[in-house]
Amino acid sequence: MKLCQPCAPRRTPLLPWLAGLLMAVPWCARAEDRAAADERARADANAEILSAEVALQAGECAAATREYDAAIQRVEDAALAGRATGVALECAQYEAAARALARWRSLAPGDADALRAQLRLEVARERGSAAAQTAAALIASPAVRERGVAEEIASLGRTLGASRTFGLLMRARAPGLDAPAAQLALGELALDGWRLADAARLGAAALRAGAVAAAAQGLIARARAGLGDAEGALAAARAARGADARGSAFAEVDVLELLGRDAEARAGTEALREDVATRTEAERRLAIMAFNRADYAEAQRRFAAQLQDPQGAPLAIYYLAAIAERRGDRSVALRGYAMLGSTAFGAAARHRAARLLLAAGEREQALALIAQEAGSGIAARLVAELESAQLLIDGGAREAALEQIESTRRRFPGHPEVAYQRAILLERAGRTGEAVQSLEQLHRARPGDGTLSNALGFILADHGRELPRAEKLIRAALESEPDNPAILDSLGWVRYRRGATAAALPLLERAWRLFRDGDIAAHYGEVAWASGDQARARAIWSQALAADPDNATLRSIVRAYAPQLLPGAAPAGPVLDPTTGTPI
């Protein structure tokens, strides 16, 4: 062995204290042995990392987590520990995430990304008090102060969900949250989290604190409209436009749409079409309005005119393909959807095309289209697998859908989203008892999850089971999102099922005004019919069928009460080529 300097023979004897000191220092041979061991550890870790990434590509989440868990024990690498934490969180392997996170934070104390990961883990485990403390520490961290608190608030909302993030930050009371931009960001979070009164309050607070007037007034306008305060909403919208005529040009139109005053919204948009600065956006909006009221001739004309605009063309192609689909021209629709692969509308177009292929019996081609969504990320792969199961159940292939979700469950063991979607699929497949049992188990594990409470309560109500408890579950879900139309719909439905038709109607009316969804329209129309207002029921169903003619719940209800309203293919008319806008 080649001798290095500390191991070379010395001419003079060592002093006793120096000899004692050197006894604590590895000898050259030991240092080389340790270097070799470190090299072997790094090689083993690299092999485990490679195995983990291969497992992720194959959708084997648990295996990937195990390999990363092993790798981080071999080497001191903060970035590797961070990657292991991220994989474990995405895979919902929370024990492994906790180990990786502890390793990460020991190697990189104070890292803001590690704090964000800790917050995700605490939220996933429903540790509210700890999560609020972590959120406060994150908001107060130097990295977040440098980046901007408002930007962090928006980012957390996208990661954790608007309602949950809003609740955490309200409890956190961290320094910096009272700044004008932060107040505005919190207001937007409240709006997205269906807390409209809080959104209006925070918008007003931001305005008083000196936030950008147009943004604050726009927030107040949308919140007031959702609350049904037409006068306050329109006043705020006009103030927003007064503060920024160009950036808030459509503020009043947006409020009118939220208030359900569609004719006025359309007239306001027509007026904005006369201004060259707002003409393009006004044309886009008018085309979508025409499509949603099933005026396909006008929608085609307006969308065809937008094909020459590079920015507007993808949207126009998507809607021209959708019109072709509704008019029964499958080949033209598929051709249009195929053109959108690399655009922002690519995912939506693939889903529409997959449904057309499945309806024609081309299951493998349909599933292959959805599989294109998987990419290389864990979340994207999971979404694609869940979408495949949803596609199959929508197409009536119940057993295939359940096989798909079981396959996903094997690869993503313990993942709460997979378990939730499995319960929903079981109910849709007619296996109500198993669905309820699964949701009960999930609810016991996550009693504070409003989505689970609402789902369990709605399914119980829809099947006439434990109605008092169903209502209690739904009301608990509504506490965190008091203006959520899906939960308002559930509450209206359970009240109707309990015989309180008069009490159900305003709940369903408000849900419908907040969100023009086919499922809500089905329930609202049925309750209106039961109350004796058949004209209102028909009007609701007609409006919903124009915008969402394929909604299975809506069609089932309408078929039972007013089958003459059901559309077949859209009225005959020329089908336009999505590329050129010319008749085919």
Image (cartoon, rainbow, N blue to C red):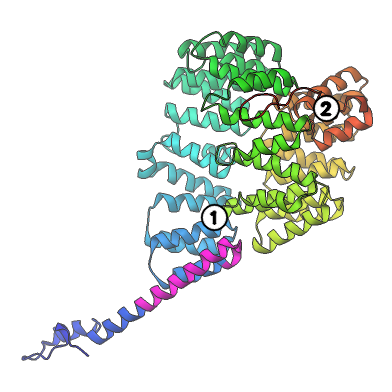
Figure quadrant of the N terminus? bottom left
Q: Earlier in the sequence, mark 1 or mark 2?
A: 1
- Residue at 79% from the left image edge and 56% from the top image edge: 400
The answer to which of 71 and 484 lies nearer the viewer is: 71
Indicate which label's residue lies in the foreground, 1 or 2. 1
Find disc 1 in the rendering and name its residue.
Answer: 376
Q: Describe the element under mark 2 as helix, strand or loop.
A: helix
Within the magenta stretch, is there residue 52?
A: yes
- Residue at 56% from the left image edge and 65% from the top image edge: 55
Place of residue 9 in the rendered image (x, y in percent of width and height, measured from the top left)? 11, 91
Q: Is residue 229 left or right of residue 436?
A: left
Label 1, residues with CA under 10 Å away: few <14, some 14-19, many ≥20: few
Q: Is residue 156 left or right of residue 400?
A: left
Label 2, residues with CA under 10 Å away: few <14, some 14-19, many ≥20: many
Q: Describe the element under mark 1 as helix, strand or loop.
A: loop
On screen, 558 above or below 222? below
Find disc 2 in the rendering and name its residue.
Answer: 524
The region drawn magenta spans 39-63
Label 1 vs label 2: CA separation? 42 Å
